[in-house]
Amino acid sequence: MKVCVCMYETTNCKVGCVCGGWSMVLLEHGMGCLSQPGKPMTLHHSTMYRKSKPIVLCTGNKNKLKEIVEIFGENFPYKVDNQDIDLPEYQGEPEDIARAKCELAAEHIRGPVLVEDVSLCFNALGGMPGPYIKWFLGKCGTAGLYKMLDGFEDKTAYAQCIFAYSSGEKESTVKIFDGRCEGIIVPPRGPTNFGWDPIFQPNGYSETFAEMSIDVKNTISHRSNAIQKVKDFLLQGNH
Ligand SMILES: O=c1[nH]c(=O)c2ncn([C@@H]3O[C@H](COP(=O)(O)OP(=O)(O)OP(=O)(O)O)[C@@H](O)[C@H]3O)c2[nH]1
Ligand SMILES: [Mg+2]
């Protein structure tokens, strides 16, 4: 990261911002910065948008993409492009799968990338199917997934969404953001257009993800919890 030292005094910034090369431009434009000396700057959103490289979100899942775009919202200051690259997913712990997927995406894109990997974890099964939910869903369907818990009293589960971000720079480390939503597995209810939504009923709600409005899902979901962390990270000037 290039280090800039602010040489201009503004109301908010006196000296020494570490800002990835932006402060001169911004300060010459009279925009100032909002950070404490030595801390990353919070930059003016529209300027960030114009100056920074787009973040490439690598996913082939249109439902995910729709939710991600909605959760980022209109005021998200970075341009996010989508590329449907078929990235191999290794076996292992969810975080390791997301990290490996992100490294492959960064190699391919050679720029800033975000990937997402989702797990549905049944507590009675020690967290399985977890990251393999896609394959279980494909082979057993939602009703079959519910039946997997027939022999267990414990129907509790959690949905986990891991975002992984890489700046795409050589030797940059992958940053992980883990978001979860606790709930129970129920017989399928509601529209069937997105994965296992019909069998996941989040705690505190009487509707499954599939039955509730997308606005409600997007405020409580595993995905929205993870994206909030991604947003906080990026808005601290980390992109
Ligand atoms: O009902 C759902 N509500 C959700 O909120 C949700 N998020 C993901 N999924 C499904 O869970 C598996 C994850 O696998 P996954 O993370 O590898 O996704 P994917 O392979 O479809 O896309 P990607 O890897 O290209 O991003 C896939 O079957 C997804 O369809 C969801 N189902
Ligand atoms: Mg996948």
Image (cartoon, rainbow, N blue to C red):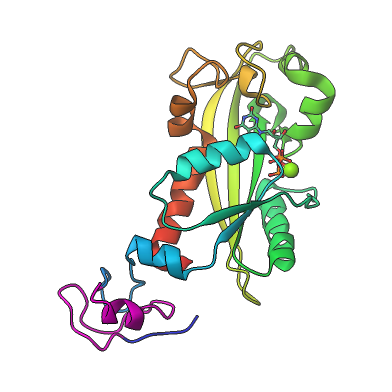
Quarter of image, res 43: bottom left
Q: Residue at x 40, y 59 (%)?
A: 235
Is residue 237 among what the camera can see? yes
Residue at image location 52% in from the left, 32% down from the top: 181
**Picture residue at 61% right of the left edge, 73% below the top:** 172
Give the x, y percent position of residue 27. 27, 79
Number of on-image labels:
0
**Quarter containing ligand 1?**
top right
Boundaries of the magenta span: 6-32
Q: Nearer the viewer, residue 165 or 204?
A: 165
Nearest to the observer: residue 14 or residue 147: 14
> Would you say 24 lies left or right of 59 here?
left
Give the vertical position of 153 relative to 78 (above or below).
above
Left/right of residue 231 with respect to residue 36 in the rendered view = right
Please say whether residue 179 is one of the residues in the magenta stretch: no
Q: Please tell me whether residue 151 is drawn above or below residue 99 in the rendered image.
A: above
Give the overall secondary structure of the magenta segment.
Answer: loop
Residue farthest to the left, as pictured: 11
Rendered location of residue 158, percent (x, y): 58, 30
Q: Quadrant of residue 26?
A: bottom left
Please name the residue shown 66% across and 32% down the image.
Answer: 120
Q: Position of residue 161 (x, y in %)?
A: 59, 41
